[in-house]
Amino acid sequence: MGAEVRLLALLLTVLGGYLDLIVSTTTASTRVERSVPHGTWNENPNPDLTRIQGVVRLQRLYCRTRFHLQINADGKVNGTRDHTSPYALLQVRAVDVGILAIKGVKSGLYLAMNKRGKVYGSQRCLTSQKKLRDNCKWHETIEANNFNTYSSALHPKKRHRKGVRWYLSIAKNGRPRRGRKTKKTQRSAHFLPRHKSGRSRRRRDRMSRAQKRGKKQKN
């Protein structure tokens, strides 16, 4: 009987030591994990995002109101019928998934929107750390009618207006409408990206299909 008690005591001692080892290992692992900055375990947690960042396209934005968007040297933004206008040639760069920076090649100004919904060309879109300011970021969305819409990534700021977007648009007179007065369903907010030459058979075909679909939806 005495031998059995001693054996049982020995087994309990070994089991207790094993449990202590498990607890200490788990605690150490947790400490190490907490001490490592987020993302260190996976150096590239989002390879798709890394791949698209920095991609630059030279193009023109052709509005459904038959104007090309241009950013003039004085910061004025408007539409032009001249598809060869140097101020209508734009440098479009992806800065995040679905978010772009739009810069005039000739003027060197970024397309921006202020708190009143006015669009303009800005020189102050980059911070001292060379990061793009939020008022110069744009959401690009391909709508059901195959046209693109561009909405401010910053405005409006008010939280109770969550889900509301302010859109880039060119009215029939060639002037940009205020973002807060524009809806994505309006023709003035619909754009087609065009090749830098301003002429593209593929783009013309795409626009023709988009216009036909738009007429069918209207009817």
Image (cartoon, rainbow, N blue to C red):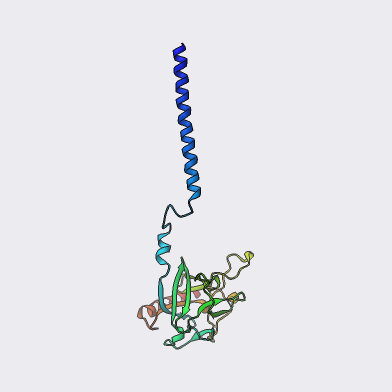
Q: Does residue 20 sit above or below 150 in this rendering?
A: above
Q: Nearer the viewer, residue 184 or 32?
A: 32
Q: Does residue 183 sit above or below 4 in this rendering?
A: below
Q: Does residue 140 sit above or below 171 in this rendering?
A: above
Residue 34 drawn at (x, y percent):
50, 48
Q: Nearer the viewer, residue 30 or 73?
A: 30
Q: Residue at x 48, y 28 (%)?
A: 16
Query: Residue 202 vs residue 66: left or right?
Result: left
Q: Do we see residue 13 in this rendering?
A: yes
Residue 92 drawn at (x, y percent):
44, 75
> What is the residue that sits farthest to the left in this orientation?
201
Q: Residue at x 48, y 87 (%)?
A: 80
Residue 197 drawn at (x, y percent):
38, 83
Residue 192 drawn at (x, y percent):
44, 77
Give the mark count: 0
Q: Do we see residue 211 in this rendering?
A: no
